[in-house]
Image: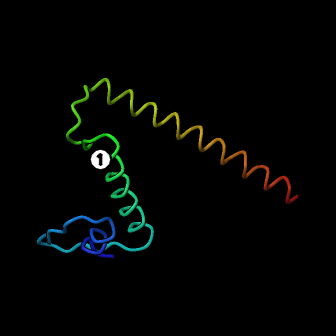
Amino acid sequence: MSKEVIAKIVGWEFVREPEEVLVSGVEAEVCIEIARRQQFGLAKYGTTVDANPLSLMQWVQHAKEEAMDLAVYLTKIERMLRKLEDDGK
């Protein structure tokens, strides 16, 4: 999927770059999801990550909190998979 198509999906204006980079499959899905998250964040917080004036320590804290959330989600998924495996035995 081209960046032009991704831009159209998420409602952005596309400016063609010198080299057209094509993505497909999982990569395209991730690109679209990132673009949607950026739009969501902009609407929710009124700024982009790049323009956000947080201090370095504040960015570290945000990253730690995101990593802890990820650990919680992965643990939940792991438990669900173990239950599925146990139920299948």
Query: Is 80 or 37 nearer to us in this picture?
Result: 37
Between 88 and 40, the residue placed more toward the observer is: 40
Q: Residue furthest left?
A: 18
Residue 35 is situated, as x and y percent measured from the top left of the image, at 33, 58
Q: Residue at x 14, y 68 (%)?
A: 15
Residue at x 25% of width, y 44% of height: 48
Left or right: where 44 falls relative to 64: left
Q: Tell me which amino acid carries mark 1.
A: Leu
The residue positioned farthest toward the right in the image shown: 89
The number of numbered badges drawn on the structure is 1
Q: Position of residue 25 (x, y in %)?
A: 43, 73
Side of 29 where 71 appears, left or right:
right
Q: For numbered disc 1, what is the local secondary structure?
A: helix
Disc 1 crowd, CA 10 A, few/some/many (<14, 14-19, 20+): few
Q: Is residue 50 above or below residue 57?
A: below
Using the image as rendered, state which of residue 33 and residue 88 is in the foreground: 33
Residue located 36% across and 56% down the image: 34
Q: Position of residue 68 (x, y in %)?
A: 52, 33
Residue at image coords 72%, 52%? 81
Q: Quadrant of the C terminus?
A: bottom right
In this figure, which residue is indicated by the disc labeled 1? 42
Residue 84 to residue 68: above or below = below
Q: Tell me where residue 51 sits by quadrant.
A: top left
> Can you say which quadrant of the picture contains the N terminus?
bottom left
Q: Is residue 25 above or below residue 47?
A: below
